[in-house]
Image (cartoon, rainbow, N blue to C red):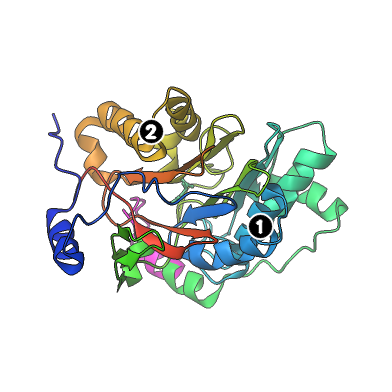
Amino acid sequence: MINRRKFINASAFTSLAALVGKKAWATPEYETVKGKPIVISTWDAGLNANKGAWGILGKNGRALDAVEAGVMVTESEQSCCVGLGANPDREGIVTLDACIMDEFFNCGSVAFLERIKHPVSVARRVMEKTPHVMLVGNGAQQFAIAEGFPLEEQTLSPDAEKAYREWLKKSEYKPVINIENKKQSAFAPSRLSTGEWLPGGQAGNHDTIGMVAMDSQGNLSGSCTTSGMGFKMRGRLGDSPIIGAGLFVDNEVGACTATGQGEDVIRMCGSHTVVEFMRQGFAPEAACKKAIERIIKIKGEKVKDIQVAFLALNKKGQRGSFAIHKGFSYAIKSHDIEMLVASKSWFL
Ligand code: ASP
């Protein structure tokens, strides 16, 4: 049985409190930070991705366009875990998964897609131009080509090539908690225009990017894109392209995205579960925490070996996250703020 540990990091809280000479942050949900538009996204790559989204949200554009443009930024960056420069599967081939969902329950998804630079845009075409939700593998690639997406070279980036050669030495598959945090650097606590303080934390390299946004009309959309777990079995899909697991949007309630060990998100329909907790009245952070508690209950002691994090936004523009282990961070951008926030977690 795993005992619940105090989830607010006491030392961080104390030093922050000393810094501002009063309560470090006022509410668990940072409720004073409201207003539209707003975009939030996973990991430190979210900072750049949010800028991409803001190009649309800041001009009163639609959340759907923003979440596509936002994660395209990450798909174009060199990264271990998103886009064609990412780590390959066990056969040395990069396969990509992505999905997108709008305010009308329209959704599209691609999975096991090779040699296409922007899977999220192909997912959007699936949503808008086919009667289906999901296309996979060769079929997804054929559709992308028919839609005019260029077929890129089948090559590994220098970093991915190096990582793959290293992995081949043992050829062991073991998910690495917070793989994105291998190149960590600290980021400082930040003061909001409201006077509140948000905690600092560790910035990592990055991982799957999940993004949810509310536009100036108050409508929600979300997107998620990844190469999945590095050195996965050929054909393996994680949660990221699965609507209800890696992403879910209900425009009456809120939106959620997930990152981490996809198998454990899929088995409890993670993002949908978080949105349902928000429907019951839980604020985003509390809803994410309840979903994490469910994973902890399911996994028992094995939870020590996996990382999962949920990130959610509700219809009021409140946002929050919760992770199994420390190290997860997310990026926010609104008219008031632009920053990285360290997530609370079950284990410190
Ligand atoms: N959720 C992704 C997957 O399981 C990986 C990650 O977010 O780290 O494919």
Picture quarter with the N terminus: top left
Q: Is residue 239 above or below residue 39?
A: above
Q: Name the image quarter holding residue 341.
A: bottom left
Q: Nearer the viewer, mark 1 or mark 2?
A: 1
In the orientation shown, which residue stands out farthest toward the top? 280
Q: Amino acid at mark 2?
A: Ala
Please check the rendered image and state whether residue 165 is part of the magenta-colored stretch, yes or no: yes
Q: Is residue 131 above or below residue 76?
A: above
Please check the rendered image and state whether residue 195 is part of the magenta-colored stretch, yes or no: no
Q: Amino acid at mark 1?
A: Leu
SS assignment at label 2: helix
Numbered-mark total: 2
Residue 117 visible at all: no
Label 2 CB, ligand 1: below 8 Å?
no
For mark 2, does the 10 Å Cα neighbourhood hold few (<14), some (14 to 19), or many (20 or more) residues?
many
Compare marks 1 and 2 and give the one earlier in the sequence. Answer: 1
For mark 1, does the 10 Å Cα neighbourhood hold few (<14), some (14 to 19), or many (20 or more) residues?
many
84 vs 171, nearest the viewer = 84
Residue 5 coordinates in the image, percent (x, y):
14, 41
Residue 86 visible at all: yes
Residue 44 coordinates in the image, percent (x, y):
43, 64
Segment colored magenta: 164-178
Task: Identify residue for label 1.
Answer: 57
Q: CA distance from mark 1 to mark 2?
A: 26 Å
SS assignment at label 1: helix
Position of 155 with respect to 184 (left or right) is right
Q: Which mark is residue 46?
A: none
Residue 256 coordinates in the image, percent (x, y):
50, 40
Task: Identify residue for label 2.
Answer: 287
Position of 313 with respect to 113 (left or right) is left
